[in-house]
C-alpha cells in the first residue's frame, strides 16, 4: 500500500501545479494575440497552447519546486522554533504594516509615476521593518497569550541545556522541586556530546555520560518541564563552530535562558546578554549562612595550605578553614566562625577553635 504524500511532497506538487497553471495562462494569452494578428487561425489553438504551457510548466518546474519546497520547510521549522510571543509580535507587525501601506497608497496614488511596483516595494519594506521592530521589542508589547490573560508571567520560559548541566544531574532535582519550569531544549549536537561521553573508553567519563542520559530520561517524565530535543534542521542556521558558541547563539535567537555548570560558558554567555541558570550558584545560594561568632562542631580531616591550619567540611560540602587546628587532624572540635568568603568554586568558612573545644555536643554541621 502506498503511503500518502508527506508535507514536502504535497508542497512540491502544489508549487508545480501553480507553475503549470501560470504557463497555461501565458499560452492562452499568446494564443489570443496570435489569433488577433492572424498568425494562428482556429479557436482550437487556444486550448492547444494552454495545454502546451501547462505541460511545459509541469516538466520544467520539477527541480525548482523541490528546492522551493525544501526552503519553505526550513522556514517553517525555524518559525516553529520561535517563542509564541515572537510569532504573535511578527504577525501584529506585518498586519499593521499592510494596513499602513493601504492608507499610504490612497495618498500616494495621486503622485505622478506611482505604480504597482513602487507600491509592492513600499509594502515589503514596511512589513520587514515592522516585523523586525515588533519581534525585537515583543516583551514590551501587551500581546495576548493563547488561552490566558496578557501578562508576562504567562509566557513559558525556554531553557537551553548544555552537556555539563545534564551530566551534573542536579537539574532534574531542581525541576522536580518546581524551581525550574517551562520548556527545556536539548539541541541534537548536545545530545551527541553526552552520548559520546557515555561511550568513552574511560570508565569515569562513561559513568558520567550514562548518568546524563538517565537525567534526560527523568526530565522527560516531569510534568513541570517540557523536554524537547531540537533536531539538526531546527539549528541549521546557527553559525558553525564550537558547541558553546552555538548554544549561546541559540539562546540569543530564541530569547532563552542557558542552563550550565561551566564557569567559562557562564561568563561568555552573560557577556553576550544571555541569562544563565547555574546549579552551582543555586547550591551556594541555599547553603546555610554562618555568621561570625557562631559555633560549629566539625571534624578536622586534613591540614590546610598555611602552617597550623586544619580543614573540615560541613554536610553541604562547605569548606571550613580552622586556625591552629593542624594538630587535631582526625579529631572533632568546636570552632567559632570568624568570617565567610564567597569564591567561584563555592563558599568558604574561616574559624578558630572555641574555648570549649574539648567538650562534646551534638554536631551543628558535621562533615560526611
Image (spheres, helix red, strand yellow):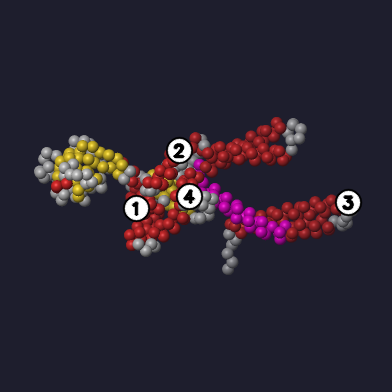
Q: Badge 2: how crowded within 10 Å, few (<14), some, or many (20+)?
A: some
Question: How far apart are labels 3 and 2 at the CA level?
Answer: 67 Å
Quadrant location of the N terminus in the rendered image: bottom right
Q: Is disc 3 in contact with disc 2, using a CB cutoff of under 8 Å?
A: no
Q: CA distance from mark 1 to mark 2?
A: 30 Å
Q: Nearer the viewer, mark 1 or mark 2?
A: 1
In the rendered structure, which disc, 1 or 4, sits on the residue that comes first in sequence? 1
Residue 314 coordinates in the image, percent (x, y): 22, 46
Residue designated by label 1: 169
Q: Nearer the viewer, mark 1 or mark 4?
A: 4
Q: Indicate the position of residue 169 as horizontal and vertical percent values.
A: 34, 53
Residue located 66% across and 33% down the image: 103
- Mark found first going from the N terminus, 2 or 4: 2
Give the residue number, with chain letter if any, for mark 4.
Answer: 246
Would residue 356 be counted in the magenta stretch? Answer: no
- What range of the chain is rendered magenta? 57-85
Local secondary structure at mark 2: helix
Q: Label 1 to label 4, Cα distance in Å?
A: 22 Å
Residue 152's disc is 2
Q: Secondary structure at mark 4?
A: helix
Q: Nearer the viewer, mark 3 or mark 1?
A: 1
> What residue is shown at x 72% (from left), y 54% (from top)?
21
Q: Tag on residue 94?
A: none
How packed mark 4 is, by other alpha carbons closer than 10 Å (few <14, some 14-19, many 20 or more), is some
Residue 136, percent across and down? 53, 39
Amino acid at each position: 500500500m502506498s503511503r500518502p504524500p508527506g508535507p514536502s511532497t504535497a508542497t512540491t506538487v502544489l508549487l508545480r501545479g501553480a507553475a503549470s497553471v501560470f504557463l497555461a495562462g501565458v499560452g492562452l494569452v499568446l494564443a489570443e494575440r496570435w489569433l488577433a494578428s492572424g498568425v494562428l487561425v482556429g479557436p482550437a489553438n487556444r486550448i492547444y497552447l494552454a495545454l502546451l504551457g501547462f505541460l511545459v510548466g509541469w516538466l520544467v518546474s520539477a527541480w525548482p519546486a523541490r528546492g522551493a519546497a525544501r526552503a519553505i520547510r526550513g522556514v517553517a521549522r525555524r518559525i516553529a522554533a520561535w517563542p509564541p510571543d515572537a510569532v504573535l509580535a511578527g504577525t501584529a507587525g506585518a498586519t499593521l504594516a499592510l494596513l499602513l501601506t493601504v492608507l499610504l497608497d490612497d495618498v500616494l496614488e495621486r503622485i505622478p509615476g506611482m505604480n504597482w511596483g513602487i507600491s509592492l516595494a513600499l509594502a515589503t519594506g514596511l512589513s520587514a521593518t515592522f516585523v523586525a521592530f515588533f519581534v525585537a521589542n515583543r516583551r514590551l508589547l501587551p500581546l495576548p497569550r493563547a488561552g490566558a490573560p496578557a501578562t508576562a508571567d504567562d509566557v513559558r520560559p525556554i531553557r537551553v541545556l548544555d552537556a555539563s548541566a545534564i551530566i551534573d544531574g542536579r537539574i532534574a532535582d531542581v525541576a522536580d522541586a518546581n524551581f525550574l519550569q517551562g520548556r527545556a531544549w536539548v539541541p541534537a549536537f548536545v545530545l551527541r556530546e553526552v552520548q559520546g561521553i557515555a561511550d568513552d573508553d574511560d570508565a569515569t567519563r562513561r559513568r558520567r555520560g550514562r548518568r546524563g542520559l538517565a537525567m534526560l530520561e527523568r526530565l522527560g517524565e516531569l510534568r513541570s518541564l517540557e523536554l524537547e530535543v531540537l533536531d539538526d534542521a531546527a539549528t541549521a542556521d546557527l553559525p558553525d563552530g564550537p558547541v558553546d558558541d552555538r548554544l549561546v547563539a541559540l539562546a540569543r535567537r530564541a530569547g532563552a535562558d542557558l542552563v550550565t555548570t561551566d564557569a567559562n560558558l557562564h561568563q561568555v554567555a552573560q557577556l553576550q546578554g544571555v541569562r544563565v541558570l547555574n546549579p552551582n550558584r543555586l547550591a551556594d545560594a541555599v547553603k546555610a549562612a554562618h555568621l561570625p561568632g557562631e559555633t560549629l562542631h566539625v571534624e578536622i580531616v586534613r591540614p590546610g595550605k598555611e602552617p597550623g591550619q586544619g580543614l573540615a567540611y560541613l554536610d553541604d560540602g562547605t569548606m571550613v578553614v580552622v586556625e591552629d587546628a593542624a594538630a587535631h587532624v582526625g579529631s572533632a572540635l568546636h570552632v567559632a566562625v570568624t568570617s565567610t568568603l564567597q569564591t567561584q568554586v563555592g563558599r568558604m568558612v574561616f574559624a578558630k577553635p572555641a574555648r570549649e573545644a574539648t567538650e562534646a555536643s551534638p554536631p551543628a554541621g558535621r562533615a560526611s
